[in-house]
Image (spheres, rainbow, N blue to C red):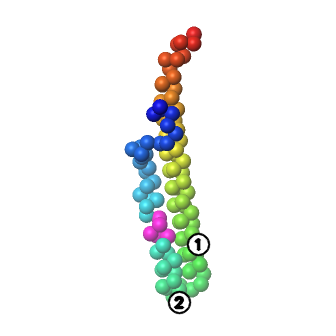
Amino acid sequence: MPILNSKPSSGYLPHSSKSAATAALPPLAVALPAVAAMFHDRFGVAVSVALVVVSLVLVAAAGAMVARAAAAQADAVRARRDADVLDALEPLAGARR
């Protein structure tokens, strides 16, 4: 039965308002250590370490956004599947009375 299929449909992709920010973070996270390596002599050790730490924070933030979007999509798919199952079982509720 299609309503009991546990796999989400491939056509359903929720649009996230944070998708542009998520797409912009990885290039920035890669560029910061490169800038730190290129200008290490001018910046010094403290600024280079700070740039690398900021880069790691950006990578963690991007990962958190992607995980949150995936969880929201899974919840939406599960809620949609549950609603379909309940709609399919609705005629059976009258037969039991």
Q: What secondary structure is the stretch in magenta mostly built from?
A: helix
Secondary structure under the numbered disc 1 in the rendered image: helix
Image quadrant where residue 52 sits: bottom right
Residue at label 1? Answer: 53
Image quadrant where residue 96 sits: top right
Residue found 45% across the figure and 54% down from its top: 18
Q: Disc 2 or 1, which lies upstream in sequence?
A: 2
Farthest-out residue, front: 1
The quadrant in which the C terminus is found is top right
Residue segment shown in magenta: 25-29
Farthest-out residue, top: 97
Q: Are marks 2 and 1 in contact (CB under 8 Å)?
A: no
Q: Is residue 76 visible?
A: no
Q: Amino acid at mark 2?
A: Asp
Q: Position of residue 14 (x, y in %)?
A: 43, 45
Q: Is residue 28 magenta?
A: yes
Pointer 2 local density, CA inside 10 Å: few below 14, some 14–19, many at least 20: few
Q: Amino acid at mark 1?
A: Val
Residue at label 2? Answer: 41
Residue found 55% across the figure and 57% down from its top: 64
Q: Position of residue 77 (x, y in %)?
A: 49, 40
For residue 20, above or below residue 85: below
Q: Is residue 71 magenta?
A: no
For residue 60, above or below residue 93: below
**Of the numbered discs in the image, which one, if any, rests on residue 33?**
none
Q: Is residue 10 visible?
A: yes
Q: CA distance from mark 2 to mark 1?
A: 18 Å
Secondary structure under the numbered disc 2 in the rendered image: helix
For residue 3, above or below residue 53: above
